[in-house]
Amino acid sequence: MGTAVGAHLENPKPQQSERVVPRAYAAWLLGIFLLTSFWLWAAFVRGRVHSRASQLLLLLVCAALLAGFGWLVSGALRRRFSLSSREGAKILAYSSSAFLLLLVFFPEYLMGRPVLVRSFLLLGFSLLLFAFYLALSLRGAASSIKRPQPNVAPAIALVIFCAAYFVLTSWITLAKLHAFGYVGQDIAYFTQCLYTTLHGQLLYSNMYHDLLYGKPVTSDLAGHNQLVLFLFLPFFMLHKAASTLLIVRNFAIVLCAWPVYLIGRRFLSPWLAAIAAIAFLLLPAVLYQNFYDFAPLSLAGLPLLFALYYYLEDRFVPYLIALICVQIVREDLVFAVFGLGLLALWQRRSRRWVAIPCAFALGWTFLSWKIVFPHFLQGATPAVASCFSYLGASPGEMVRNIMHHPGMLLSHKNLLYTKQMVDSYGGVLFLLNPAWIISIPYIAINVLAEGGGCNTAMIYRHYSLIPTVFLFASVLLALKRVGTRAEGKGRRAEIAQAAILLFVLMAALSSTVFVTGTQQWDDLQSRPWHQEANQVAAMLPPNASAAVPRYLLPAVANRDSLYQSLRLLEYHHPDAGYIVIDKDWQRMAATEQWRENYNALWHLLEISPQYQMTYDSPNYVIYKLCDGCAPNLPHREPMKEMRD
């Protein structure tokens, strides 16, 4: 796509008449005209008008409007800037490349019918990109045109944007938390891990451990080697609440603009480097890190981008420190560290750039899977393994099953996820630099785990951040080569680089629009029952063990024993002193898999002599375990034929 965008900047051949529009320009304009006409039909006519004759008529109307738009723009350019027909055609052909943005999302219109708001926004982004391309082409075509100089330095503008970005995203994050818009279990899990660590239990949380493993497993280190959690402890000590984790996470996300800007400044102008940093923050996989349930993996972007920067700067010691910071985020980042070592081998760097990252990754792999996990699992089966168990009982069997049944990976959700991962890069721009190859293991893991019901193939979850970093880095690093090739053809490097960056920026905004729906808005809305929910949470004694609905978990996570009332009967040793039942199943945000056990729990509590009702309303009922009584709730497995 970058080749197509830049193809119209070449100087005209002197022997051609100024009044003749070259066939290449005419063919390009015709192709864009047909593409945009059919997109307008698919976006605003298809499926909305039943008569074929009416659809054909409206298609012709769309084509006529588009042709009129092009004629008006071409005429205005020739009159305003005294351009010849050839020059006007060249500028119009180059600027029309902006409508390739519509092509990126054309499959959504062929396979379905996106809502009109998304169509209008996508059309608006395309027109805005068209205006940017007009400005770029005029700047390159006529040196006599006065170029306005911005009054604000790009670095200052970027800082202002980042400050606004952090304030806005954090406000939305807290609004969602207070509106019980999060599922809540992951946020509460990590909050409890920090709380118990401060009270002498290393990253302990019974909320997951007793549910997934049983009592012998007592630390988060049984599931993930994510030492980065200890960096949250100083902040958590200042304010012991779930909101602390979310705000620190958001701050780490916005700081990613810093290394992106530094990388861009190596071969881009200051303004283009600032645009690159803004585009990165607006990628859907990055933007939604600020709003999704908390996970330490969201912090990997910052050290990973600094590692790439120091790699480019040829500064080995800071690079190695950055790799260590990357690796402490989570154990599966060994693929990224090892991949960077292989990238150094590909680029024929010195031995230490290859050997040390690869050896470090292999050593961390051995430490995590052979020492840390076995020690803390204490013989239990890793919960993560359940995501891939459907593939086979051993790695060899998994590989054979994938080879014999590749269709298991080609589900609609996996295909949609893969497309969403590359939408922001025009589907192909990331191929211009080999760094994108490092993203393959992470995309593969997400696609494979999705088949096991682990919900990893979602563009807005933390699993998508790592591959996104490498895909975006590939585009960014390729801009140096794009600039060199442009200069070799007698064009300005800055214009070719700006064209690609602006396309990525608009594609990122468009991708975000397509993954955002009414659910995200609903998560922020205040409901009549919210006030009572907060009152119910306040009724639970601070040190008592409690089982509550998932959305209430973050509000009561600072305690040693915490359970999900939705799945209380699945725990191996449920010992809840207080149990909160939400009488409205729809508020649970859960599939029918859990409903039978939830109803069974409610029935058992109604007839149990050990539990006494202490609160009852149209929305909630609270049961308290009598003093000196031992809970006698049975252990029940959930329905197996459905997944959460």
Image (tube, rainbow, N blue to C red):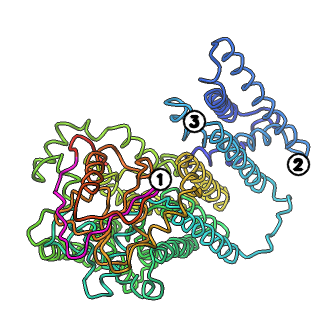
Query: Sequence order check: which comes first, mark 1 or mark 3?
Result: 3
Q: Position of residue 530 (x, y in %)?
A: 53, 61
Query: Sequence order check: which comes first, mark 2 or mark 3?
Result: 2
- Please give the residue where the numbered disc 2 appears in the rendered image: 81
What numbered label is drawn on residue 189? none
Residue at image location 42% in from the left, 42% down from the top: 416
Q: CA distance from mark 2 to mark 1?
A: 71 Å
Residue at image location 39% in from the left, 85% down from the top: 233
Where 305 sits versus 280, above or below? below
User: Can you tell which of label 2 and label 3 is closer to the viewer?
Assistant: 3
| Magenta stretch bounds | 617-638
Q: Quadrant of residue 465?
A: bottom left
Is the magenta region chiefly helix, strand or loop? loop
The answer to whether residue 515 is left or right of residue 346 is right
Q: Amino acid at mark 2?
A: Phe
Where 530 sits versus 43, above or below? below
Label 1 sits on a secondary structure element that is loop
Q: Quadrant of residue 184?
A: bottom left
Q: Position of residue 40 (x, y in %)?
A: 66, 30
The answer to whether residue 274 is left or right of residue 225 is right
Q: CA distance from mark 1 to mark 3?
A: 39 Å
Is 236 or 446 nearer to us in this picture?
Answer: 236
Q: CA distance from mark 2 to mark 3?
A: 39 Å
Q: Position of residue 247 (x, y in %)?
A: 51, 75
What numbered label is drawn on residue 618? 1
User: Can you tell which of label 2 and label 1 is closer to the viewer?
Assistant: 1
Q: Amino acid at mark 1?
A: Pro
Where 499 sits versus 353, above or below? above
Where 11 sits versus 308, above or below? above
- Please give the residue where the numbered disc 3 appears in the rendered image: 114
The answer to whether residue 25 is left or right of residue 394 is right
Q: Quadrant of the N terminus?
A: top right
